[in-house]
Amino acid sequence: MDRDGLLRSLATRVRDERVLAAMAAVPRELFVVPTMTAAAYEDAPLRIGHGQTISQPTIVARMCELLELRPTDRVLDVGTGSGYHAAVLSRLCDHVWGIELETQLALGAARSLARAGIDNVTVVDGDGVLGLPEHAPYDAINVAATARGQVPPALEQQLAVGGRLVAPVGGDGCEQLVHVRRHEGGFERERLESVRFVPLR
Ligand code: SAH
């Protein structure tokens, strides 16, 4: 599939025009390893080294829709990997803080984002299970690796009131996307479709 083909295919399933525009604005080929450039517009996860993968465009779009981003939002992206998902998020909000455990991937993500001309993403090398308290609270948190059993409590705590979080959560062989919304009085959690991500370590 080429870039136009992927965008046409997404347009049949993604309702939010802003999300479609963000997907159209980010050149995915800048975020894949050089040997994978020809496959950059396949609607599939692709290897990015260190045993990790760049997320599938369909799931990136779906998670962006679920986060209901506004142009003024401050967003935390956990498991930034190649930087692709963070790049799409950055087209929908004010600023993204990306946190990535693998130092080499964090460096690569920062390089790819710069090459794409994106200047509102800050990539931090660290453990995303703990979030990034120094820039909290976040209007939205995107998690791209599967947490075991529950959404890491530190991440929920770093949501602003009214904030949204999406994360894959696994246990007993099944893995589901979980949506969390923080209210004045607590957290509203909803289990959505089955997904497959690499584990959160
Ligand atoms: N969003 C990425 C997908 C990366 S796959 C993209 O668009 O390319 C998930 C990433 O989570 C991997 O890069 C992995 O190294 C990272 N990861 C796993 N556990 C983590 C943790 N505890 N903290 C931060 N990053 C983590």
Image (cartoon, grey):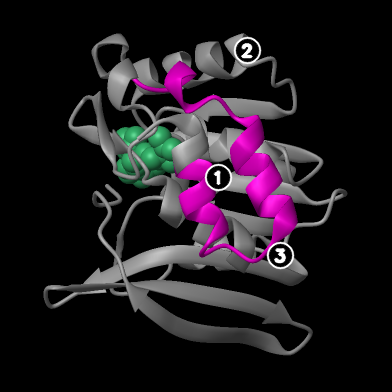
Numbered disc 2: secondary structure: helix
The residue drawn where x is 25% and y is 34% is 52
Between 188 and 31, the residue placed more toward the observer is 31
Tell me residue 80's x, y (percent): 46, 36
- Looking at the rendered image, the quarter that the N terminus falls into is top left
Q: Quadrant of residue 46?
A: top left
Alpha carbon separation for disc pair 2 and 3: 25 Å
On the question of residue 66 being in view, the answer is yes
Q: Which disc is residue 136 wearing?
A: none
Tell me residue 41's x, y (percent): 39, 33
Residue where numbered disc 1 is placed: 77
Check disc 3 and give the amino acid type: Glu
Residue at the limit of the structure toward the left, as seen here: 173
Q: Which disc is residue 68 wearing?
A: 3
Count residues near mark 3 (Cα–Cα under 10 Å), then give few for <14, some for 14-19, many for 20+.
some
Residue span colored magenta: 6-32
Residue where numbered disc 2 is placed: 114
Dot 1 beta carbon under 8 Å from ligand 1: yes
The residue drawn where x is 44% and y is 74% is 178
Numbered disc 1: secondary structure: strand
Check disc 1 and give the amino acid type: Asp
